[in-house]
Each structure stands twice: as structure tokens, then as C-alpha cells.
Amino acid sequence: MKKLLLLVFLGLNLMLFSQKKPDLTKIIDSIAQANWTAANKELDSIDATSISNIKVAKKSDTVIFEKVPQLSVQDMPITPYAMLNTVEAQRWFIFGQNSLIFNQSSFSNWYAGGNDNIGVIGKVNYNFNYKSGKHFLENNVQLGYGFVSSTGQSTRKTEDYINISSNYGYDLGSNYYLSTGFQFATQFGAGYNYSLTPDPTYSDRVSKFMAPGYLNLGLGISYNPTDNFQLVMRPINGKFTFVLDPDLQQAGRFGLERDGQSMRAELGAMVNATYRINIIKDMTLLNKLNLFSNYLQHFERVDIAYSAVLNLKFNRFINTLVTFDMVYDHDQIAGLQTKQTLGVGLTYNFGFKLEREKNNKIINPFIK
């Protein structure tokens, strides 16, 4: 009898335990957690420590990149627009352009005549730009030097300039910026008037380093709506002309008012416009116009400096450059000054890639 009761008891317990339902809540939670973990890498959150290729500092909001942003193969930027609108975490943006331009002619039994000649022009153009919030600092260094050597003639200079500028801007909204900064310009070596002195000596020089040298300091507004256009207006601008060579400090030269004067100061308004036109694919025209009017003397006489560079790009490194420069400054000479060059050159650009890839799902980073 006891054995029968024991068997009945065990049978009832077995039936009860077999009827127990599973915990559906735990099962659903486990499936949701698995889906969450799988999708975690796609989340745009700084708390997602499993984001690929990015390290996140736990105790701060700093994103650490293991790799430097990709180098650019795009054209040299002429305005800070792209830098001001980029999503890169970088604060410093460095761009460079190095050019070596050649022109050459040779003759053998050529009935029309001519002299063998070869010319070389080297140019560098570097931007060192900084951005933080609504503040930015744009620094530009442009250097150029060239010469031509012809049979039967001394080597002659064809290009010589040093241009350094720095501009601070504060974002006012709608692509307008408070603008203040300076521009400095001079040359490397002595210059000569070859039409008057075909075989000059140093005593025949008409210019040299810091004779003249120009410095502009101003305050105003800049308007920068696109990569290819910028307008800078400075109603308060000081222009200083330096002539540090005593032999060239003569009244009327470089606008000097008396013999022995080493510096001339002017106060006026300056307007600077930069505009690049994309004519067709791989052909661009860069225009730069600078206007200055002196408040203190002959306000109606506007100093004009215009330059144009036509760039025909064959590939990433080889291009043809045609340059044209025009200057009118009544204080220097009551006439129009012009210069034109043509050559085929090697050009190498480098710098950070400013545009964001469309399919890039990396989070929008920022630095404290």
C-alpha cells in the first residue's frame, strides 16, 4: 500500500512540474538586448565605446582619432569658407602649394634669328589656419622668385615677391565676419630697369629688399558666402611704405615726399575682392582686386592692384599658368604698370580634406 501511495505522489509531482510555463519576459529581454548590442556600432552617441576605429575618453568629451585626416587632392583653397563650415575635429588646417614653372626657347640656323633662353619661376603658397567656435585665424605666406637666362645677355629677374598676411575673424552670422589683420609685401633681391641698363651693376638698382616694403593694417568686415568668393571691406586701414635703402630714398620714388624719407604713412579705406571662376573642367581663372584710397590726401586717387591667374590643369601635377598683373598708384608713377607671364609647370598641393564623405557614419566629433 505504501509503495502504491509513493508512486502516486511522484506521478502527481511530475505532472505539476511539467505544466509549469516558461518566463516569457526574460526571453523577450534577452532578444532585445542582443539586437541592441548588434546595432550599437551604428549609434551616433559618444557613450558608445564600441564605435569602430575611435577611442572615447571616459572622463571627458574628447574624441581621439588614431589616424590623421586624409590628405586633399583638391585645389588650393582661396577663402576660409570650407574651413569654417567643415565638421572635422581638427583646429589647425595647413594647406600648401609648390610650383615650378618653365619656359625655354632654342634656335639653330633659324633664318628669323633669336637667342637661346631658359626661364624658371619657383612659387610657394602656404595657409596656416585656425578655427575655434566663432573665431578663426587665417595666415598666408606667398613667395616667388624667377629668372631668365639668354645667350649674350646677363641673367635677368622675371619674378620676385614676398607676401605675408594674417587675418582674424569673428563670425557675425549669414557669412559675415568681423575682420582685422595685416598684409606685408616686399621682394627678395635687387631689381633693375634693363631697358636703361642692359648689363646692370648693383649701383644701378631701382629696388631691393624693403625698398620698397608695404604694410597694411586694418579693421572692417569680410563677406565669405562660398569657397570661390570673398570680399573684405576695411574703412579703417593704415598703409605704410618703407624704403630702407638710403640710395633709393628720393622724393617722388615709391611715393616718398622728400629726400631721405624712409617711411610714408597713409590712412584710408581698403577693399579687397577675391573671385575664382571655374571656366570648364580643369580650367580656372583666379581674380584678385585691391583698392585703397587715402583719407588725408587726394581721396579721389584710388590705388588699384589687380592680378589674374589662368590655370589649365593637365593632371594632378602638370599645368599651364598664365598670369597678368596690373598696378596703378599715382604716388609712384602717373601711369599703368603691367606684367604678364606664361609657362608650363609642376604643381603639388597638399592639405586636409575639408568636405565630409556622404556615406561616412562616424559621429560628429568635437574637442574641449
Image (cartoon, helix red, strand yellow):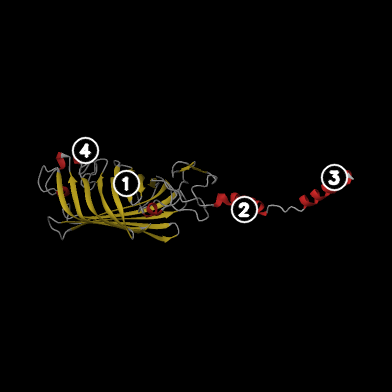
The secondary structure type at the circle numbered 3 is helix
Contact check, label 3 and label 1, Cβ < 8 Å: no
Residue farthest to the right, as pictured: 1
Marks 3 and 1 sit apart, C-alpha to C-alpha, by: 96 Å
Local packing at callout 3 (Cα closer than 10 Å; few below 14, some 14-19, many 20+) is few
Marks 4 and 1 sit apart, C-alpha to C-alpha, by: 34 Å
Comes first in the chain, label 1 or label 2: 2
Residue at x 52%, y 47% (from the top left corner): 48
Comes first in the chain, label 3 or label 1: 3
Residue at x 71%, y 52% (from the top left corner): 22
Local packing at callout 2 (Cα closer than 10 Å; few below 14, some 14-19, many 20+) is few
Marks 4 and 2 sit apart, C-alpha to C-alpha, by: 85 Å
Q: Residue 65 versus residue 298: which sits nearer the camera?
A: 65
Q: Amino acid at mark 4?
A: Tyr
- Reading the image, the residue beneath label 1 is 139
- Residue 127 x %, y %: 35, 46
Q: Viewer-nearest of labels 4 and 2?
A: 2
Q: In the rendering, which numbered label is found on residue 202?
A: 4
